[in-house]
Image (spheres, rainbow, N blue to C red):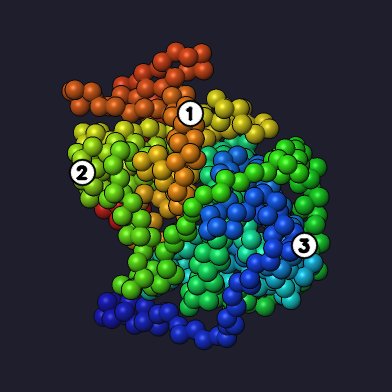
């Protein structure tokens, strides 16, 4: 009887069939006569199929690039993000979109609905603007509790859109690992992420726009007001006043001054340059969010041929690295055929998702036995680097998602080396074919590793050892894990035995 009552209750709470109207819109052709088009030409667009790219590792510069892209757009802005935080950087970003819309720019904002409910009023208000449309990907319906959704609709809501891109006038795009939030742009004192974006112009931008259109018009992108409802007491005028107030507050801070300095140093006349190289976007099809087989190949299978053809080395930088047994076997096979594999990921102290670290750590010895080189980020890396304006006490976390193959190919995007990126979430990234740029990037990585990471090795007796270089050049060695509290280690040990690896 109890079982029957529970079953009837769940059936009664089963997902509803939602019906609503949605228009189909697509990206507009780029124009060489637009301000951004003239900028691309001035930066040397050869018009021969190559794309112009610039890697952006500095957080302040990464936020400035987005704000300036919004300020320069004349026709369209398309932004696609997993997270947009209700914090000063999120306010600056949202205000830049609103200001563009006020100038007549068509703004399309596609957000995964993982973390948007806290600012539904602002979302609904901005969506009232005649030039702004906001859609939420795979939404959590507001008339259903998270508990009921988890019980009745888990297969759907477990699949998230992890893509990250921003494109102006179909001329310039920014693709990479950053969400919109303070910790991604060196704007927090207590914790900041090391991350990486690609600013690009040229043919690859069309590929980003085509991918955006596919997501925007997919069945999984729902008009925001269908999800959050019509605005109640918070109007578009209220939203504009509030954002203007928040922006003025941000301008008066030390971080605001740092942004202005970064804009002058990195984007003033003559300061910006691009490398014009072959580049291609790789992205999951939006149909991956359905969790069913599709004729469109997923991102991981699209990238696999590059690794199958690797001849010398594979370098992987992945914030969330969960190789699983098949991954260990695959990397060991690469090593066995003469391809050196190097992985940089988070340490226990720099990691922000404990289950991910726990399930990586349980495979550490197997990876090392297979010949893989492992490096773990020091949580005090920002203190060593002295990056940003006042981050001497900031804890560091790795959020970059990149890999390089054979000193030729460099991939930068949202793809982590974990089961969630491979099988569950949707991802994207740009693959750059440039020996010069790849070698330059790997050179910078190799230079940074000794001081900013722990090199993890396996001794003959099976003992793990962590090695790093101190600021004065001395070498420090540890035979027990050098980061994390006792409680962190206890929690990690417990999480490592839970059968959750396929969901990480």
Mark 1 or mark 2, which is nearer the start of the sequence? 2
Q: How many numbered discs?
A: 3
Q: Do labels 2 and 1 touch, CB within 8 Å?
A: no
Residue 178's disc number: none
| Residue 400 x/y as whole percent | 48, 44
What crowding class fits label 3: few (fewer than 14 Cα within 10 Å), some (14-19), or many (20 or more)? some
Mark 3 or mark 2, which is nearer the start of the sequence? 3
For the point 45% across and 48% down, the residue is 433
Mark 1 or mark 3, which is nearer the start of the sequence? 3
For the point 30% across and 52% down, the residue is 501
In whole angstroms, how far apart are the C-alphas of marks 2 and 3? 53 Å
Report the front residue among 385 and 124. 385
- Which residue is disc 1 drawn over? 448
- Which residue is disc 2 drawn over? 333
What crowding class fits label 1: few (fewer than 14 Cα within 10 Å), some (14-19), or many (20 or more)? few
| Residue 29 x/y as whole percent | 63, 71
> Which quarter of the picture shows residue 354?
top left
| Residue 91 x/y as whole percent | 70, 55
For the point 33% across and 73% down, the residue is 294
Report the front residue among 325 and 449. 449
In whole angstroms, how far apart are the C-alphas of marks 3 and 1? 39 Å
- SS at mark 3 in the image: helix
Q: Measured along the vertical axis of the image, is residue 406 above or below residue 78?
A: above
- Residue 321 seen in the figure: yes
- Which residue is disc 3 drawn over? 99
């Amino acid at each position: 009887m109890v079982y029957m009552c529970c079953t009837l209750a769940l059936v009664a709470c089963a997902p509803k069939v939602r019906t609503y109207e949605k228009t189909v819109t697509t990206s507009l052709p780029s124009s060489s006569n637009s301000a951004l088009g003239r900028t691309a030409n001035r930066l040397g667009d050869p018009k021969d199929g190559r794309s112009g790219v610039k890697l952006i590792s500095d957080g302040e510069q990464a936020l400035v690039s987005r704000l300036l892209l919004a300020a320069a757009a004349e026709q369209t802005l398309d932004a696609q993000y997993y997270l947009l935080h209700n914090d000063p950087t999120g306010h600056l970003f949202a205000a830049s979109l609103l200001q563009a819309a006020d100038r007549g720019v068509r703004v399309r904002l596609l957000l995964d609905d993982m973390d948007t409910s806290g600012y539904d009023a602002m979302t609904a208000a901005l969506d009232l603007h005649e030039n702004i449309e906001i859609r939420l990907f795979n939404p959590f319906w507001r008339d259903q509790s998270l508990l009921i959704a988890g019980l009745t609709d888990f297969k759907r809501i477990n699949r998230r859109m992890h893509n990250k891109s921003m494109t102006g006038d179909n001329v310039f795009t920014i693709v990479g690992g950053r969400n919109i939030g303070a910790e991604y742009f060196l704007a927090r004192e207590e914790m900041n992420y090391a991350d990486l974006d690609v600013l690009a112009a040229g043919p690859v931008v069309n590929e980003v726009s085509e991918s955006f259109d596919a997501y925007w018009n997919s069945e999984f992108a729902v008009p925001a007001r269908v999800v959050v409802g019509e605005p109640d007491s918070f109007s578009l005028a209220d939203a504009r006043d509030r954002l203007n107030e928040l922006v003025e507050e941000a301008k008066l801070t030390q971080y605001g001054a740092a942004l202005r300095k970064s804009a002058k140093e990195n984007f003033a006349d003559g300061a910006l340059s691009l490398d014009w190289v072959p580049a291609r976007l790789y992205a999951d099809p939006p149909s991956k969010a359905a969790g069913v087989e599709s004729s469109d190949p997923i991102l991981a299978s699209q990238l696999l041929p590059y690794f199958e053809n690797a001849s010398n080395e594979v370098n992987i930088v992945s914030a969330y690295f969960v190789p699983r047994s098949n991954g260990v076997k695959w990397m060991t096979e690469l090593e066995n055929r003469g391809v050196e594999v190097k992985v940089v990921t988070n340490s226990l102290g720099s990691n922000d998702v404990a289950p991910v670290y726990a399930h990586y750590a349980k495979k550490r010895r197997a990876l090392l036995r297979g010949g893989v080189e492992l490096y773990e980020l020091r949580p005090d890396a920002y203190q060593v680097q002295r990056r940003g304006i006042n981050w001497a006490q900031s804890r560091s976390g790795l959020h970059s998602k990149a890999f390089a193959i054979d000193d030729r190919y460099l991939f930068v995007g949202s793809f982590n080396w974990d089961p969630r990126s491979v099988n569950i979430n949707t991802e994207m990234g740009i693959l750059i074919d440039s020996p010069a740029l790849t070698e330059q990037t790997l050179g910078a990585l190799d230079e940074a590793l000794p001081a900013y990471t722990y090199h993890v090795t396996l001794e003959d007796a099976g003992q793990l050892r962590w090695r790093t270089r101190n600021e004065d050049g001395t070498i420090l060695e540890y035979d027990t894990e050098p980061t994390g509290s006792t409680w962190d280690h206890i929690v990690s040990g417990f999480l490592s035995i839970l059968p959750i690896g396929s969901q990480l």
